[in-house]
Amino acid sequence: MQVTLKIQRFNPEKDSAPYWKEYSLDMHPNDRVLDALLYIKNHIDGTLTMRSSCAHGICGSDAMRINGVNQLACKSLFSKVGNNVTIEPIAGLPVIKDLVVDMEPFMEHYRSVLPFFINDDPAPEKERLQSEEDRLKFEESTKCILCACCTTSCPTFWATDAYVGPAAIVQAHRFIFDSRDQGSQQRLEILADPDGVWRCRTIFNCTNACPREIKVTEAIAEVKKEILFSKL
Ligand code: SF4
Ligand code: F3S
Ligand code: FES
């Protein structure tokens, strides 16, 4: 199939504003948008800049706006996206060049929720055991690959980047509901901040954008409920 990719280009060292550039190439319906981008980069225009690594939906590095929807380029088949495809960087983060954004503001929010296991008890001889039922409470949030598709599709985050964002809340959820962790109270206090979970207006873009099919809005609602129960 003949495809046309209309890609937003921007080199802040040279360009005063972003502009569109079109590339036409022959692809198979089962090729991914990432295949086309790599072909352009390697054979047509070496100046095109994007991130990618695993090419299999695991590293989360190639999130971009494809036909107006945040997706991973390595999981977007031409049979699904069609043959006229617009590609832009994810929104709400500063563009470094072309499709590469500065992930630091996103990572800062991620770090702010203490996304690591906290338990000061002496380590047991073997592993810290947990029932299957307890494990299921945070099963979904362990699937997050920090791709930022959710946070950068959230209108609340576009309006104020002080909002911690859905990805950070999902990461906090992973530990808040882990029966072996002792840092839940600290995380709930952090997320009870005006720029924490209460900034979420239940818009659901995050859930629709998640390539791991995590029920992001539901996870946020669970954290909100936990804060209310904790009377913070
Ligand atoms: Fe990506 Fe989903 Fe994690 Fe958000 S919750 S960062 S969309 S994997
Ligand atoms: Fe934003 Fe998702 Fe809430 S899109 S407002 S974080 S439900
Ligand atoms: Fe790793 Fe797409 S390149 S998720």
Image: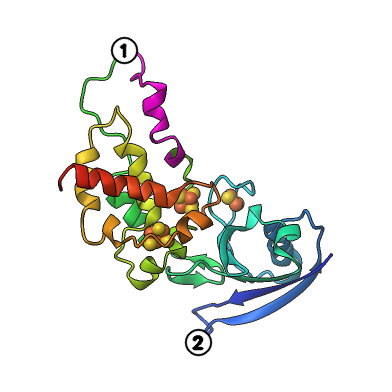
Residue at image mark 1: 125
| Crowd tier of the residue under label 2, counting other residues whose Cα lies within 10 Å: few below 14, some 14–19, many 20 or above | few
Residue placed farthest to the top in the image? 125
Q: Is residue 10 visible?
A: yes
| Crowd tier of the residue under label 1, counting other residues whose Cα lies within 10 Å: few below 14, some 14–19, many 20 or above | few
Pick whichever of labels 2 and 1 is earlier in the sequence: 2
Task: Left or right? Give the position of 159 relative to 97.
Answer: left
Residue 33: image location, x then y, percent: 69, 60
The residue segment tinted magenta is 125-141
Judged from the image, the secondary structure of the residue bearing numbered disc 1 is loop
Residue located at (29% from left, 16% from top): 124
Report if residue 136 lies within the magenta region: yes
What amino acid type is highlighted by mark number 1? Answer: Glu
* 103 in relation to 158, above or below: above
Determine which quarter of the picture holds residue 157: bottom left
Within 8 Å of ligand 1, the CB of disc 1? Answer: no
Residue located at (24% from left, 38% from top): 184
Residue at image mark 2: 16
Residue located at (78% from left, 53% from top): 30
**Front residue of 97 and 36:** 36
Which quadrant is the N terminus positioned in?
Answer: bottom right
Task: Left or right? Give the position of 134 relative to 147.
Answer: left
Residue 142: image location, x then y, percent: 44, 38
Residue 164: image location, x then y, percent: 32, 58
Label 2 or label 1, whichever lies nearer to me, is: 1
Judged from the image, the secondary structure of the residue bearing numbered disc 2 is loop
Residue 75: image location, x then y, percent: 65, 52
